[in-house]
Amino acid sequence: MLVGILYPSKQAQETFVVEVDFAADLSPGETIQTATVTALERTTGLNSTDTFLSGSPAIDASTVSIRTVGGTAGETHRLQFTIHTAAPFSNVIQHELDVPVEDFQR
C-alpha cells in the first residue's frame, strides 16, 4: 500500500531518515521481528537500494526507519518497507513511500 509521498521533496545533497509507522496494521501484542527496505527509481524501474539508501533499517516499536542519501533532480524513488511480525502472528506487511528528488538552487 502506498502510504504517501514525501513532502517537501528531498534535494540530491540532503541526507535524512525517513520512517513508516505500522501501528495501525499490528494487532494488540503483535511486534515487528524483522524489517527490510528497498528502493526503486520510478522512471527507469531500476533498483536504487544501494545508491539511495544508507545502512540497515531500524525498528523502534511499530516504526521502521532508514537513511536516504543522494538521488538526482527529477527522480522519484519508491521505498518499500517490508516487515515480518513475530509468532504467533507471523504476518508480512508492506508499505511504500515515494521520495521525489528536486533541485532548489537559489
Image (spheres, helix red, strand yellow):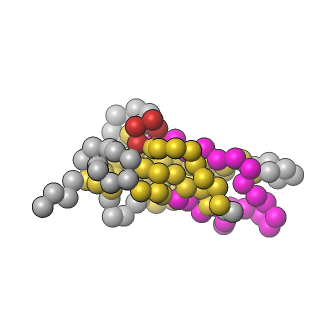
- Specify whether residue 85 is in view: yes
Magenta stretch? 19-39
Q: Tell me the quarter of the picture where residue 20 sits.
A: bottom right
> In which quadrant of the rendered image does the C terminus lie?
bottom left
- What residue lies at 66% left-to-right and 66% top-to-bottom? 24
- Specify whether residue 96 is in view: no
Residue sitting at the far left: 106
Residue 14 drawn in magenta: no
- Across and down, in percent, residue 2 comes to 51, 55
In the figure, 52 relative to 100: above or below?
A: above
Q: Is residue 48 left or right of residue 11?
A: right
- Across and down, in percent, residue 103 comes to 21, 53
Q: Tell me the quarter of the picture where residue 61 sits.
A: bottom right
In the figure, 88 relative to 8: above or below?
A: above
- What residue lies at 40% left-to-right and 60% top-to-bottom? 6
- Across and down, in percent, residue 93 comes to 66, 50
Q: Is residue 5 left or right of residue 103?
A: right
Q: Is residue 80 left or right of residue 101?
A: right
Name the foreground residue: 2 vs 17: 17
- What residue lies at 72% left-to-right and 62% top-to-bottom? 26
Residue sitting at the far right: 88
Name the foreground residue: 60 vs 45: 60
User: How many labels were placed on the picture?
Assistant: 0
- Across and down, in percent, residue 69 comes to 38, 47
- What residue lies at 77% left-to-right and 64% top-to-bottom? 27
